[in-house]
Amino acid sequence: MAERNPLSRCWEDLAFAVVRRAMEDYRACLRKAVRIPPPKRRGLEKQARELEDFFLSPWFAVLCGGDGRQIIEQLRKEVA
């Protein structure tokens, strides 16, 4: 098996870090939203929608090739 190009490895690591950060941010938004009264959670809801848009975007598919809907469902189950 051929070894990966070091530059390719760097891009893969960066893509993984971007996706991981988005997942951590989404998880944190969901957890905070549960503890905050509805009128005060608008900012968190907006951030959560933006992260969902990212998970469902073509850019997400380019970065990891994963199923964004499945990621959203999985993270919602973790927080529930």
Image (cartoon, helix red, strand yellow):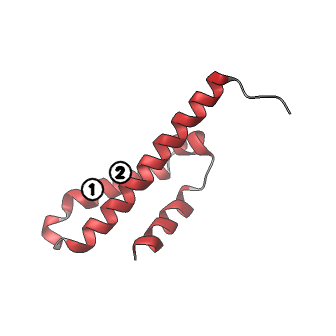
Residue at point 27%, 56% (across, down) = 46
Where, quadrant-wise, is the C terminus in this rendering? bottom left
Depth check: 28 or 39 in front? 28
Q: Which percent across, then down, holds residue 15?
A: 53, 38
Residue 3, placed above or below residue 66: above
Q: Which percent across, then down, holds residue 65?
A: 63, 46
Element class at badge 1: helix
Kindly identify the amino acid type of the residue bearing the numbered disc 2: Glu
Residue 3: mark in rendering: none
Residue 1, placed above or below residue 46: above
Distance in Å between CA atoms under marks 1 and 2 = 6 Å
Where, quadrant-wise, is the N terminus in this rendering? top right
Residue at point 44%, 54% (across, down) = 23
- Decide: few, some or many residues near mark 2? Use Cα within 10 Å; few <14, some 14-19, many ≥20: few
Residue 46: mark in rendering: 1
Element class at badge 2: helix
Residue, disc 2 = 50
Kindly identify the amino acid type of the residue bearing the numbered disc 1: Lys
Relative to 58, 33 lies left or right? left
Residue 59, placed above or below residue 6: below
Depth check: 1 or 78 in front? 1
Q: Are marks 1 and 2 in contact (CB under 8 Å)?
A: yes
| Rendered image quadrant of residue 42 | bottom left
Depth check: 51 or 10 in front? 10
Relative to 41, 13 lies left or right? right
Q: Which percent across, then down, holds residue 62?
A: 59, 39
* Res. 52 visible in picture: no
- Decide: few, some or many residues near mark 1? Use Cα within 10 Å; few <14, some 14-19, many ≥20: few
Residue at point 13%, 65% (across, down) = 40
